Amino acid sequence: MKRLISMMLFLTVLFTITIYRNSQNGQKPNVQTSGSLNGAYTFGDVVSSREFIERLIGEIKIGRVDDKNSEEEDANMKMKVEVNGNIFYATLEDNSAVNALIEMMENEPVVIRMRDYAGFEKVGALGKSLPASNRQITTESGDIVLYQGNQIVLFYGSNSWSYTRLGRIDNLDGWEEALGSKDVTVTFSLE
């Protein structure tokens, strides 16, 4: 949506500059429109960019087939996290690492053997590198992060380090007990 608005603003500015230059040279603009916008404006009309874009957007229908609320769904993309038979759901972040992880899960569930580290996290090798956008963060129980680009970390405690956020477990009931203090097998899949 941001990309669409940026494009529309750019086109509006370009359109306005062209009309202004042509009016300075005494030329009438050669503008052709279709649909209900045809004839909506005539040369010399003064309309705000916002009004022009709102009318134009009203004429454009953009969307994905079979995807009614794509913005809401994208904003709340979910992942199923199964820890030794216990099922949890996580809300995913919006970043390139998550997009790459989603591509992996679209092919098949991602299964990782994870080991306990320092009594507050489980760490497991992903088997491939994902795009990292690390920054210093303080994690909490339920956070899912990417470490060194190729390891997934599940937190049941807190730590401060440089990670790429992937998501967060929605409901922590039973989370710490499911992870336990031993190695676990975790399956990540799309909901």
Image (cartoon, rainbow, N blue to C red):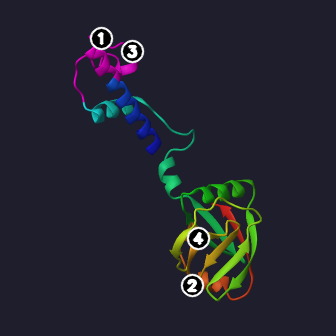
Q: Which residue is mark 4?
A: 163
Mark 4 vs mark 2: in front: 4
Question: Is the residue 179 above or below the residue 40 in the image?
Answer: below
Mark 3 vs mark 4: in front: 4
Residue 7 visible somewhere in the drawing: yes
The residue located at (74%, 67%) in the rendering is 126
Residue type highlighted by circle 1: Lys
The residue located at (51%, 59%) in the rendering is 76
Total marks shown come to: 4
Within-10-Å neighbours for mark 2: few <14, some 14–19, many 20+: some
Distance, label 2 to label 1, CA atoms, is 68 Å
The magenta segment is: 18-47
Q: Position of residue 56 (x, y in %)?
A: 37, 29
Q: Is residue 60 left or right of residue 92?
A: left
Residue type highlighted by circle 3: Gln
Q: Nearer the viewer, residue 124 or 27?
A: 27
